[in-house]
Amino acid sequence: MINHRLSQNAHMSILGDAIRASRQAKGMTQAELGERFGISKAAVAMWESGKNIPDQRKMAELTRVLELDPAVAIGLHDEDPLPPANAREAPGVPRPPARQEMPKDVPVLGTVSGGDAENPADFELNGQIVDYVRRPPRLIGRADVFAAYVQGNSVSPWREPGQLIYLEGARPPRAMDYVLVELKPNNGDDVRPALVKRLLAVTPTRVRLRQYTPAKDFEVDRRRILRIFRVLDWDELMGV
């Protein structure tokens, strides 16, 4: 269908831009990235120009290596720009799921903080739904997932301000998972602060977290923590 072709071409272009920007942010050349995946520099250039996309297994690894936004990787663009009039779909490219195949029913519960534990920005994680976003294939039928938009840059370049993350409540996080830490409200306030960080360790009394900008590790007293949610990565969203 024409609408699907336009959407896929737009996705390839946006994904290519994201791959290039993330590669450059990490100081990698096209040749170095290609060596990591056993492909040529020219093949990487094809990805970045939007003329080709990685297969599912390469995409899962690429998302981890470059720390791409999974929403961009799987083409969750609410408004797809029109491609050039002469754009053609690359032969043999596996298509991502069409947007109409992914129901827009995952609740967005607000904006999470990129701040630190001493001065986190407020985030109302109290069941109030501010929006709905597309449900990736692996999340079909799951009631324990929700989404949120990151603010602040303390976890950049893993996530930039305004990027979407998907979270789950059923499975407990492990060391090196990315997590959303919901803190208890202060002085009876209804607003519960939250942090998005990388989980380093959990002890009976402390939770150790990592942020990137500025780079530092810090601890939070477990008595301050209400809940911890796992951030889902690319292969979990797509079922790779």
Image (cartoon, helix red, strand yellow):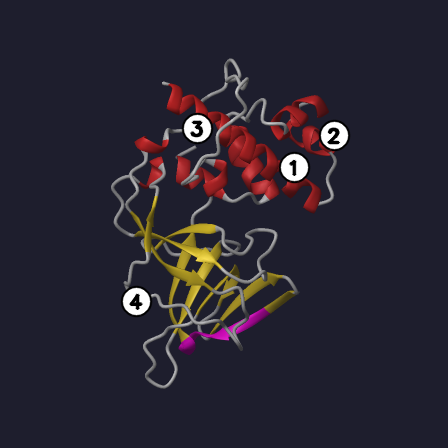
Residue position marked by numbered label 3 in the rendering: 7
Q: How crowded is the residue under tag 2: few (<14 C-alpha within 10 Å), some, or many (20+)? A: some
Front: mark 4 or 3: 3
Residue 173 appearing in the image: no
Alpha-carbon distance for marks 3 and 1? 20 Å
As helix, strand or loop, the secondary structure at mark 2 comes to helix
Amino acid found under the numbered disc labelled 2: Ala
Q: Which residues are magenta?
A: 218-224
Whichever of labels 2 and 4 marks the residue nearer the N terminus, that label is 2
Q: Position of residue 68 (x, y in %)?
A: 55, 43
Name the residue nearer the viewer: 2 or 194. Answer: 2
Residues 192 and 210: in front is: 192
Q: CA distance from mark 2 to mark 1?
A: 12 Å
Q: Which residue is mark 4?
A: 126
Nearer mark to the viewer, of 2 and 1? 1
Residue 210 to residue 162: above or below: below
